[in-house]
Image: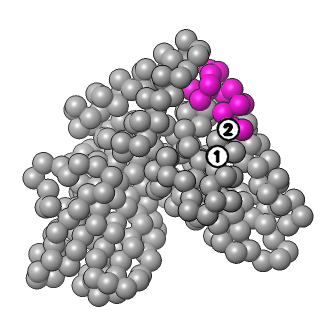
């Protein structure tokens, strides 16, 4: 495919991914909310979960954002070194963000931290934030994570002493969920990054939110930690919207990196029930495969 034609495919796919992420939850997140409603014993919590479910139906039917806070736009691009548009990718994703802001539409959420000026189109210095991982091949796997401000405000970084070990990691996660309380609009999803360094742990935690909530880590020790943290955090009883109940957390995804002997960083990223994410794979010939959602009408496929 001609590079200019491929550019248009990537641009259109960017807009489609943002529209899908903002208006339709992936099936695993919808199913997690449905299961939470089924097993909930609190009438108050049931009412909240039922309202969330109805909200999702309205958003999907009307192709409108499921929450008024449409988030800060974050992209993850896993791209082959032979994909033709490497040097243009950030520019394309920025242009796609501007288009989606107008077409979906999205609330403008990019504000200069010094002047308070809103750019009006969800772009600005370093925003949208683009994480690029270059590997072999000629395909682009593109994910978008529109991260809401309320849940972002409850994320945390804990720099533990190595001697605190995994018990310290569990304590850090539980303390963060307790402190967050109702602020991130539970039921929430937790991304936990262990090791690496301060910045690395938080990057791992946020990227972990791209994983389906029912997808356990391939390392059995990490998978066991995910399951234990899910049980422990739900025993807190914070419940839907902080009003009490059986489900505070829909899923826990843990990622890790090897650490320095003197350091044990733990990054904790909290995502609200509106667990917005969307992923597609684009081949060099312009074929697009949507991995988290059904392809939108009229989309390249």
Q: Is residue 136 left or right of residue 82?
A: right
Please, which residue is most extreme toward the right here?
163
Question: What quarter of the picture does the C terminus occupy?
Answer: bottom left
Q: Secondary structure at mark 1?
A: helix
Q: Position of residue 133 (x, y in %)?
A: 44, 77
* Residue 86, horizontal then vertical, whole percent: 32, 82
Q: Position of residue 58 (x, y in %)?
A: 28, 27
What residue sits 77% from the left and 43% below the top? 175
- Quadrant (top left/top right/bottom left/bottom right) for the N terminus: bottom left
Q: Which residues are magenta?
A: 232-247
Relative vertical location of residue 148 with respect to residue 248 in this rendering, above or below: below
Compare residues 284 and 71 and report the one nearer the observer: 284
Q: Compared with residue 99, is residue 30 higher up or lower down, i.e. above or below?
A: above
Asked if labels 2 and 1 touch by Cβ distance under 8 angstroms, the answer is yes
Q: Residue at x 59, y 15 (%)?
A: 42
Q: Which residue is mark 2?
A: 231
Q: Residue at the top extreme?
A: 43
Q: Is residue 206 left or right of residue 266?
A: left
């Amino acid at each position: 495919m001609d590079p200019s034609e491929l550019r248009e495919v990537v641009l259109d796919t960017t807009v489609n991914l943002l529209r899908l992420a903002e208006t339709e939850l992936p099936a695993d997140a919808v199913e997690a909310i449905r299961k939470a409603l089924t097993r909930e014993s609190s009438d108050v919590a049931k009412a909240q979960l039922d309202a969330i479910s109805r909200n999702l139906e309205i958003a999907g039917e009307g192709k409108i954002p499921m929450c008024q806070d449409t988030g800060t736009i974050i992209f993850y691009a896993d791209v082959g070194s032979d994909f033709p548009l490497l040097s243009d990718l950030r520019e394309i994703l920025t242009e796609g963000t501007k288009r989606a802001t107008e077409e979906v539409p999205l609330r403008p959420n990019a504000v200069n931290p010094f002047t308070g000026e809103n750019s009006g189109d969800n772009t600005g210095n370093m925003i949208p934030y683009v994480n690029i991982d270059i590997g072999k091949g000629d395909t682009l796997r593109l994910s978008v994570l529109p991260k809401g401000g309320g849940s972002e405000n409850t994320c945390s970084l804990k720099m533990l002493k190595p001697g605190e070990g995994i018990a310290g990691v569990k304590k850090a996660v539980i303390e963060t969920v307790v402190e967050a309380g109702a602020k991130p609009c539970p039921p929430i999803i937790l991304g936990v990054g262990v090791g690496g360094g301060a910045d690395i742990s938080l990057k791992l935690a946020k990227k972990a939110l791209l994983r389906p909530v029912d997808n356990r880590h391939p390392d059995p020790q990490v998978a066991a930690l995910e399951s234990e943290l899910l049980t422990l955090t739900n025993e807190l009883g914070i419940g839907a919207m902080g009003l009490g109940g059986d489900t505070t957390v829909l899923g826990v995804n843990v990622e890790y990196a090897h650490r320095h002997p003197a350091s044990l960083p733990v990054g904790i990223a909290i995502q609200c029930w509106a667990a917005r994410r969307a992923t597609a794979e684009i081949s060099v010939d312009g074929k697009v495969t949507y991995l988290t959602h059904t392809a939108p009408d009229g989309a390249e496929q």
